[in-house]
Amino acid sequence: MKIDRRGFLKIGGLGILGVAAKPVIDVVSKVKLAEASAKKGVLVEKRLAMVVNLKNCKDGCTDCIDACHGVHNVPYIANPKDEIKWIWTEQYEKAFPDQEHRFIGGGMKGSPAILLCNHCDNPSCVRVCPTKATFKREDGIVMMDYHRCIGCRFCMAACPYGSRSFNWRDPRPFIKKINPDFPTRTKGVVEKCNFCEERLAKGLIPACVESCKNKALVFGNVEEPNSEVREILRSNYTIRRKPGLGTGPQIYYVV
Amino acid sequence: MFEKALIGSKKYWGLVIGLLAIMGVGAIFYLQQWNYGLGITGMSRDVSWGLYIAQFTFLVGVAASAVMVVLPYYLHNYKAFGRITILGEFVAVASVIMCLVFIIADLGQPTRALNIILYPTPNSILFWDMIVLNGYLLLNILIGWNVLASERKSVPPPAWVKPLIYISIPWAVSIHTVTAFIYAGLPGRGFWLTAIMAPRFLASAFAGGPALLILLSLILRKFTKFDPGKDAIQNLGKIVAYAMSINVFFILLEIFTVFYSQIPEHMHHFEYIFAGLGEHGKLVPWMWTSVTLAVLSLILLINPITRRREGILALACVIVFFSLWIEKGFVLVVTGFIPSPLGRVFEYSPTIPEIFITLGVWAMGFLILAVLYKIAVAVKEEIET
Amino acid sequence: MNNRIIIIAGLIIFLCLITFPIWYNVVGGKAAYAPELKIVSEEKQCVESTKYMRAKHMQLLNDWRNSVVREDKRTYTALDGKKYDMSLSNTCLKCHSNKADFCDKCHNYVEVTPTCWNCHVAPEGNKL
């Protein structure tokens, strides 16, 4: 782990340059992209997002959770210490602590809210990862590279939504039925929802969305004005979890 | 010079063997962790960092403290510290090695640790921490060893050591600043999201580190022919007094900001450590012990009558060290996760294997320190006779 | 130099000990055997030539995983122009479904323990 001074100065200098240059490059590249798309008259950008319609979400139903955890080999570990979850429910007022008050109406008080990775626009987990094992794709999916993760759990400390789980032990014995088409994880790596990127690659929609009979989950490209997600965002008032933190969560909730 | 570590009294070998035995026990438990995974510890989905990372944080402080003897000696030509700069530098070497080992012990995939270098990521604070810690280790080994070797030959140290010494002074500040940034830059962790995290780390480092140095100096004087000097110890005592006062002041600042602003996400953490949340209050007795010890140490340190008496100064140093260990080496890290971002209170306490692995790493650090001090003292004794 | 004999004798004993595995195999007549691999497949060739795969399959798999996981590029174009889905479980193991007779044989022979199977699911049946 030794680095000589010359090497350090090189990396250090590059790093500082990089940090200084990044916002500038970001702005320039955005401007260029906007110009290009304006010229062509089409939007080239793609930003995947999800709308959760809590009004349609049935109490006690676990279809989306079962579908996701089944297809992704998420182990079921009863002990909350070692628990792993990609999508789960939490009481509304716990999920939206900023919205909590004595008189929450509309049947929302104590009702379950579906939680998953927010696939943030400005993800703090990606910012802190020392190996780029977690990174943001161009379409907005915040991905995990399980091959590269060293298990430092900096991302778990950085995520303000509790969306990340760590494999405190070998998960295999806790997977009821292994789906051979998707890898399990190994002990010592962090995991979380991947927006079903492996299904998207085959032209399928996310497993949770597909499994929901009540249309409580809608998935799509939020940059596409005619998409279903945009239609719901237009016609409903939506909220997001902890927007004040500047992470830009991409899971929208109709309440 | 290393041969000096191989010749020693029965007491020295007893110490070495004792430390090796503790390391061995730690190693056995680490093998268990290696096979089973980090689930063997008390850490959980909610409290995802525990004793290991807390020890790392505390020991960065101990390491940075070398600067408190190096700076007065080299920048202000304060001669009394000349005899003990080597002690400070060797403490830094031992503690930085412990820091690195604690980080490795905390990794879920330790065999992939080099990914930090293979895929350098300048936007990650952990990447910079890796650089500053290894740099500081290298600086202190180079400086300490070369200065001691020249001292042995009664010649001035080589010219290239001087710039390294000057670099090591701001570098010491950097290791604690960067470590504080690991915590202070995270959204949604109200307990850590404070701009004075780095100053707080520095204040506690400059209290805890020199307190340890005073204790080590007194031990060396008792068991060897090497005398660090009364002046040096007294002045270190003053440094501890100032730094501990500033540290307590900073904590009071935090308490004011949190409780006067009444922002729940910041306040709940402090409520948890001082009063407990509901039936959850495992850290309350620890925190109050730390507070009581801190106040007691200030009384003993600020009052010149008590501070000047070496026995009482030593006691005050033990109190400072233990008070800061509770605060930085445990509470600071764990409380950041309690309550969780979802408001859940999931408590943490280390498990037996976790405690023994931690003790093993400490034993390793003390072994490195014992060997380095043995060499330093033998050289000093050789010069004086 | 009164110790010369002792030192030389010691060196000889040391050399004998560390070369013991070689002697043992020579005397036992099991020297240098090559593992016999079984392939159950109708395909004539792997994605690349046998020689290339034998030497470089680990790099190829490494490139595949980086390409799929990090760049979302999932199609591999082989030297002969054929296209393949970059997937250990769904492409490689379709032919090499006999992990114990194929992967493990060679890996055991050269004493390597790849961690692939900690996560990727080995095909049913011929497990080791």
Image (cartoon, rainbow, N blue to C red):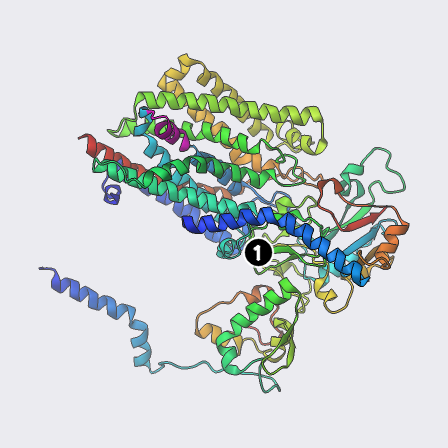
Residue B140 on image: x %, y %: 37, 40
Asked whether, in this view, residue A225 is left or right of residue B195, the answer is right
Is residue A46 something that shows in the picture?
A: no
Is residue B249 something that shows in the picture?
A: yes
Main SS category, magenta section = helix
The image quadrant of residue B262 is: top right
State which chain disc 1 sits on: A
Asked whether, in this view, residue A130 is left or right of residue A78, the answer is left
The image quadrant of residue C20 is: bottom left
Which residue position holds label 1?
Answer: A149
User: In the image as oriented, which residue stretches furthest toward the top?
Assistant: B305
Residue B135 on image: x %, y %: 43, 44
User: In the image as oriented, which residue stretches furthest toward the left?
Assistant: C2
Asked whether, in this view, residue A249 is left or right of residue B89, the answer is right
Front-most of residues A61 and A229: A229
Is-magenta flag for residue B128?
no
Is-magenta flag for residue B70?
yes
Residue at position x 35%, y 30% in the image = B74
Task: Indicate the secondary structure of the residue bearing disc 1.
Answer: loop
Please say if A189 is above or below C81. above
